[in-house]
Amino acid sequence: MKTVSVYMAALAAAVLLSGCGSTASVPAELPEEEIKKGAFSAGSSLHDPFIIEADDGSFYCYGSHMTAAVTRDLKNFTMWADGVDADNKIYDNLLTEPFDAFSFVGKNSDNGYSVWAPSIIYNEKRKEYVMYFCTTSSYIMSDLCYAVSRDIGGPYNYRGTVLCSGFTKPNVSKTNYYDIMGKDKSVRDRYITAVGYNNQYWPNAIDPAMFYDAEGRMWMVYGSWSGGIFLLELDPDTNEPVHPETDDEEGVDAYFGKRLVGGFHHAIEGPYIQYDSRSGYYYLFLSYGNLQREGGYQIRVFRSDKPDGVYEDASGHTLGINDDLDHFENYGTKLMGNYTLPSLTQEYMAPGGQSVFESDGRLYIVYHQRFAGIGEYHEPRVHQMALNEKGWPCIFPFATDGEVLSEKGYGKKDLDGTVYILDHGLGIDAEVNKAVKCTFSGGEISGGLTGSYNIDEGTCFADITTDGVTYHGVLVEMTDEAGNRTLCFTGIGDNNHSIWGIKYIRES
């Protein structure tokens, strides 16, 4: 397995130093009065978006409530499916008799069917696309299901339900529990309390996401609130989970798998694990908070050098069932929350429901974005990410628009001038984080913040130090959502905060 230092050396040699040691020529600073204000619309609304790339270079995006869209530029999305009904083109048999995917959970409170959080993996052994998704009727009563297709765009054929949650003694026979655990396995003492399913300790079976590990094994991470985030291996021959032996000391349950983080019904959900062969790490991305516009929804990350953990944040802490869950907001490195920036006409709220993908060697995160002042409307957003010198993924501040890391890198003077610094903090609330205006000069920071900065000459790596914390980050030139050219810093500190720095520059 590669170490972070090996990754950094390879990246520097292959990309950042290809300019033979000379640095990029950054255009002059754009005067404040010339900064354009603006925003953009993705043209579609999908919740919990998942993106997978097709052979023709287009990207298919699937979301909750049987929504689907396609995009070629990762910015403008064209919807082609929407709504949980039998006419939806995503599935060919999900909403037909005998409605097997809903036989346990039944209908929701609106007397309809709930289909949430799809995720797709290409099963290399069976040569088919496998979509895992969840059906649900309450905050604990859910199924994890799967469907298959030879075509990335479907239709997907429902094949079965692999896991259930929210069962009680009277209805557990409607699930696959006994098929997996055997008739002699008691559910009363382990999974059910006097008031019903023990959702403080066991998961809600929703939000599945699959990945391959370094050895080519398939895994599925899942879970929402309830007992936390869990992991199961998948059998590539059957697409079904490989159920482990129970090992309570290691947090492993034969039915649900291994608990990675969370529990006791804390607001952690939407897991996605991305393996990066360059760093050798598995990155566990999560949504914290309530998904509503003012619910403090946000994106966090842990990492591990093994697919089944232990997963730690940038401060070196994990968040297992016996850890400090009552103060879970302090743990997990916060990558993005509510924010606005000087050139934006919108306040961006409640980013989350994320997934991660790689295309053409670049790492991207897609999530749904809400906005201040317009209710609960949401749209998909895609931002590029890059690993810093410590091997942590840093989200670029603006929606992707074809930006690339400089081949020549930068020098210290490239950041000199006015830089707007935004700290995403650790709060889980409705507050919108705003940037403060700073002056960068000769390695020193003054104005809204005080501190220092340094650029690793001829690379894209930079550090900003303020209030005794050093944020290790990446520099990238990109166009913001108003059409301004910018030089951006995106970095992470060992306090689990992420900061962004924006310098507005003239067109080159």
Image (cartoon, rainbow, N blue to C red):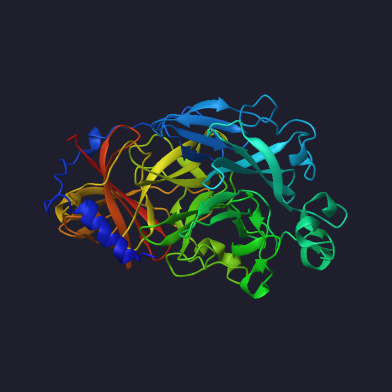
The residue sitting at 62% across, 64% down in the picture is: 258
Q: Is residue 261 visible?
A: no
Q: Which residue lies furthest to the bottom in this view?
A: 249
Which percent across, then down, holds residue 201?
70, 64
Quadrant of res 126: top right
Can residue 401 be seen from the camera position used here? yes
Observer-nearest residue: 25 or 84? 84
Residue found 64% across the figure and 27% down from its top:
88
Rendering coords of residue 51 (x, y %): 49, 39
Residue 65 is situated, as x and y percent measured from the top left of the image, at 63, 35
Q: Which residue is painted at 51% across and 62% down in the image?
A: 307
Q: 114 or 154: which is nearer to us?
A: 154
Using the rendered view, name the quadrant where residue 5 is placed: bottom left
Picture quadrant where residue 277 is located: bottom left
Between 250 and 473, the one nearer to me in the picture: 250
- Position of 201 with respect to 352 (left or right) is right
Report whether 199 appears left or right of 362. right
Which residue sits furthest right?
Answer: 170
Residue lying at 83% horizontally and 54% vertically, measured from the top left:
172
Left or right of residue 400: residue 442: left
The residue nearer to you, when weighing 51 against 435, is: 51
